[in-house]
Amino acid sequence: MLQFAKRSRGFARALALIGFTGLLLLALMTTLDVLLRWLFQAPLQGVNDISSVVMAVVIAVCIPANLAMKQNIKVEVFGTVGGKTLHDFLEVLASTLTLVFITIIAWQFVPYASGLRETGDRTWVLGWPVWPWWSVAAMMMWFAALIQLTVLLDDLRTLFAGGDDNTPSPETTSTSL
């Protein structure tokens, strides 16, 4: 199980790198479009179309890595007041709630992508079908749910091991690509 978690977290990081590369390319394309509009009154055709479909994928591919490295926003209300056991319990509770939330989102992406396929929605200028892009985003959300499940299992192991867990945490796990 630990090997699976390590490999899936490494895959999540690779996907995030792909997502950030896509975001960079999208930003460069938008900048080029603005410059061409300003200098030559000749915009790039379809930039908004590409942006509208690529953005969902770019965001979705970054979520698994965010969850794997536990880089989501959290507020530690109790600090060190309750000790390590309370802290570990609250980590399990937070991981459980995050898993439920991500699963609900992933569950809703599937009928949304299916509805886009059934209606035949296409982008305005380029005429690209929209559903494949949202299907990829849905798959990434399901992968994020799987990643969050591994995080929850890691948190449970830490809680029940009483802090004697010898496995590296997601924050310290390094994966070479």
Image (cartoon, helix red, strand yellow):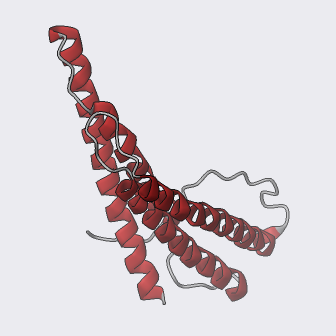
At a point 34% along the width and 62% down the height, the residue shown is 15
| Place of residue 90 in the rendered image (x, y in percent of width and height, measured from the top left) | 76, 68
Query: Which residue is depicted at the point 33% across and 48% down?
Result: 20
The percent position of residue 129, horizontal first and vertical second, equals 33, 50
95 left or right, relative to 11: right
Near-viewer residue (167 or 50):
50
- Furthest residue to the right? 82
Q: Which residue is at a point 29% across and 38% down the rendered structure image?
A: 26
Residue 161 lies in what quarter of the image? bottom right
Q: Is residue 117 visible?
A: yes
Q: Is residue 174 visible?
A: no
Q: Farthest front residue?
A: 119
Q: How many marks?
A: 0
> Where is residue 163 shown, x and y percent of the image?
67, 81
Q: Position of residue 89 (x, y in %)?
A: 77, 73
Front position in the image: 58 or 91: 58
Towards the viewer: 155 or 16: 16
Say which residue appears at 41% left-offset and 87% top-offset: 3
